Image: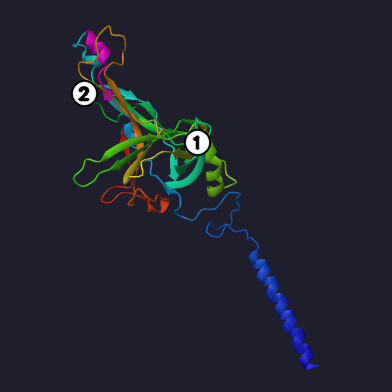
């Protein structure tokens, strides 16, 4: 009798243990962000896989001071046409990316045959976070000045942003005692490479080419894209990827003496430089066996990334 009761007690305890484990395995609603389970149809990436870039927005990007060269070409004594303020809105898209990867793909050729090529590619995500810097005039000073001055206040506004990306890969090879070489490769749309890359990265996510990515992105919307390159020189040791289109910040300069009154173009001699993201990579390998494990984000004794004007 005691043995039978002991067996029954053990079965009851085992049943309670199984139910407890089953309940713990189910998702539990919680307000704590650290324990909240988020289900998504897309592949969940480990922390640090996607690298986020600081937009580095500054207030001085909303204003620049220049002479109106067209008026000064008519009469250099037009002092009121000198050192004029030009103001405009500034927006920046949030950019996240995976470091450079490689994949072998059969690419059709003009001859009608297929050629197996090593494709370099970068997976990235852009997000319109809003917060566009918008300068507003008529800010009154609490005191008087010798000359009337118009001050501006920077407000933030939210609106869709048109994104037109452009990627340039600039590869370098500098040997000791040799000048080496520098080659520039624009990204190319390779339709046959998109499906193998999608299956490798995330079979359920829609990735866009650089052409398909040319669109308006709503506030809070994120788009995923893939930039691809082919026929890269296998001797490249260091390379940088320039990403254009992430911001509308720019600078411009009028070369002295280039503008002529009555000329065909009012922009003669003007150079415009766009704010561009520069991602630096290092590839300490050889030209005989190319593989993505050799690629490092950042360069020795240098920076990982920087914003430049070019």
| Of pointers 1 and 2, the one earlier in the residue sequence | 2
Which mark is nearer the camera, 1 or 2?
1
The answer to whether residue 51 is left or right of residue 114 is left
Position of the N terminus by quadrant: bottom right
Q: Which contiguous range is marked in magenta?
A: 65-74
Q: Is residue 69 magenta?
A: yes
Q: Is residue 77 magenta?
A: no
Q: Secondary structure at mark 2?
A: loop
Residue carrying label 2: 146
The answer to whether residue 14 is left or right of residue 227 is right
Viewer-nearest residue: 137 or 134 = 134
Residue carrying label 1: 190
Q: Residue at x 33, y 43 (%)?
A: 239
Q: Residue at x 52, y 41 (%)?
A: 106
The percent coordinates of residue 216 (x first, y second) are: 51, 30
Instruction: Tell me the distance, in whole angstroms, between the alpha carbons under discs 1 and 2.
Output: 62 Å
The answer to whether the residue labelled 1 contacts the one labelled 2, judged by CB atoms less than 8 Å apart, is no
Secondary structure predominantly adopted by residues drawn in magenta: helix
Viewer-nearest residue: 278 or 282 = 282
Position of the C terminus by quadrant: top left
- Badge 2: residue crowd in 10 Å (few <14, some 14–19, many ≥20): few
Q: Secondary structure at mark 1?
A: loop
Q: Residue at x 18, y 45 (%)?
A: 177
């Amino acid at each position: 009798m005691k043995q039978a009761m002991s067996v029954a007690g053990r079965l009851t305890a085992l049943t309670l243990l199984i139910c407890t484990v089953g309940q713990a395995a189910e998702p539990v609603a919680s307000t704590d962000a650290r324990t909240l389970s988020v289900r998504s149809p897309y592949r969940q990436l480990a922390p640090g896989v996607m690298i986020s870039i600081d937009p580095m927005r500054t207030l001085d990007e909303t204003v620049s001071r220049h002479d109106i060269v067209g008026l000064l070409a008519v009469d250099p004594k037009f002092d009121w046409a000198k050192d004029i303020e030009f103001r405009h809105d500034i927006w920046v898209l949030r950019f996240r990316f995976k470091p450079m990867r490689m994949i072998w793909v059969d690419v059709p050729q003009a001859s009608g045959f297929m050629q197996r090529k090593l494709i370099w590619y970068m997976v990235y995500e852009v997000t319109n976070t809003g917060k566009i810097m918008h300068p507003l005039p008529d800010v009154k000073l609490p005191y008087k000045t010798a000359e009337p001055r118009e001050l501006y206040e920077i407000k933030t506004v939210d609106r869709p942003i048109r994104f037109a990306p452009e990627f340039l890969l600039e590869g370098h090879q500098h040997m000791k005692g040799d000048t080496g070489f520098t080659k520039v490769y624009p990204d190319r749309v390779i339709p046959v490479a998109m499906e193998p890359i999608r299956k490798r990265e995330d079979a359920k996510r829609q990735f866009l080419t650089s052409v398909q990515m040319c669109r308006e992105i709503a506030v809070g919307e994120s788009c995923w894209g893939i930039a691809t390159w082919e026929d890269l020189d296998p001797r490249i040791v260091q390379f940088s990827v320039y990403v254009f289109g992430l911001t509308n910040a720019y600078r411009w300069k009028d070369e002295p003496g280039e503008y002529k009154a009555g000329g065909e173009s009012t922009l003669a001699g003007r150079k415009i430089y766009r704010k561009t993201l520069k991602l630096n990579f290092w590839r300490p390998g050889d030209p005989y066996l190319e593989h993505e494990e050799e690629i490092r984000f950042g360069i020795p004794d240098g920076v990982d990334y920087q914003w430049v004007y070019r």
